[in-house]
Amino acid sequence: MRELLAVILMLAAGTAAANPMLEKCLPFAPASCALTDASTADEFLACFGTKPLIETGKGESACSEELAHARVHKACDANDIPIVCAGVKPGENRTMSCLRKNKKKLSADCLKALKDYDALTSPAAEGGERKKGRGKAGVAAVRC
């Protein structure tokens, strides 16, 4: 039912680009969070907390990756990206690559979020095999 709601909201409002967590995470959000198509990334992060979802094979990995990506931006957008990666054009994994290349210059919070994201999306986290469309240039990372 929540999957259908996410698809309906996405089609009606055209919000997939505005909030990529809508399609990937709304189906797994507890109803008590009251997330909608207008919910912000911060509201999704507050709803899901800091831990990755327990995967049951129903798409949780895409949601976990999206949440981890949002945590990188929450931790890095204010200071690290504008300073360390100033001038890097977003897209095609350029921002994430810049952060990885400049780990020694990152704040502790940004570095932790980046490490958590990389641990979740690395081939080792997936039993040593990289899944198609995932990894260091995964689905979430491509847009930044």
Image (cartoon, rainbow, N blue to C red):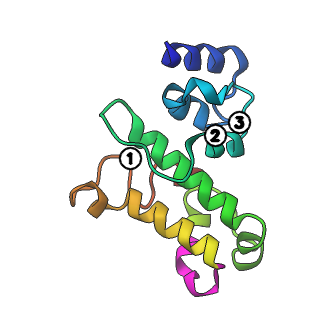
**Residue beneath label 3, please?**
18
Marks 2 and 1, how far apart in space?
23 Å
Query: Which corner quadrant of the image does residue 35 belong to?
Result: top right
Q: Main secondary structure of the magenta part?
A: helix
Q: Is residue 144 visible?
A: no
Mark 1 residue type: Gly
The answer to if 101 sits in the magenta stretch is yes
Q: Which residues are magenta?
A: 97-107
Residue type, label 2? Phe
Q: Nearer the viewer, residue 17 or 69?
A: 69
Helix, strand or loop under label 1: loop
Give the crowd class for mark 1: few <14, some 14-19, many >=20 residues within 10 Å: few
Nearest the eye: 96 or 87? 96
Between circles 3 and 2, the one closer to the viewer is 2
In the rendered image, the quadrant that contains the C terminus is bottom right
Which residue is painted at 56% across and 56% down in the image? 92
How many discs mark residues in the rendered view?
Answer: 3
Asked whether the beta carbons under mark 2 and mark 1 sit within 8 Å of each other, the answer is no
Query: How far is mark 3 from mark 1, CA to CA?
Result: 21 Å
Residue sitting nearer the eye, 4 or 17? 4
* Vertical order, 88 against 32 (above or below): below
Residue positioned 69% across, 14% down in the render? 12
N-term-proximal mark, 3 vs 1: 3
Residue 74: x and y in percent read 69, 58
Tag shown at residue 44: 2
Q: Earlier in the sequence, mark 2 or mark 1?
A: 2
Q: Which residue is mark 1?
A: 133
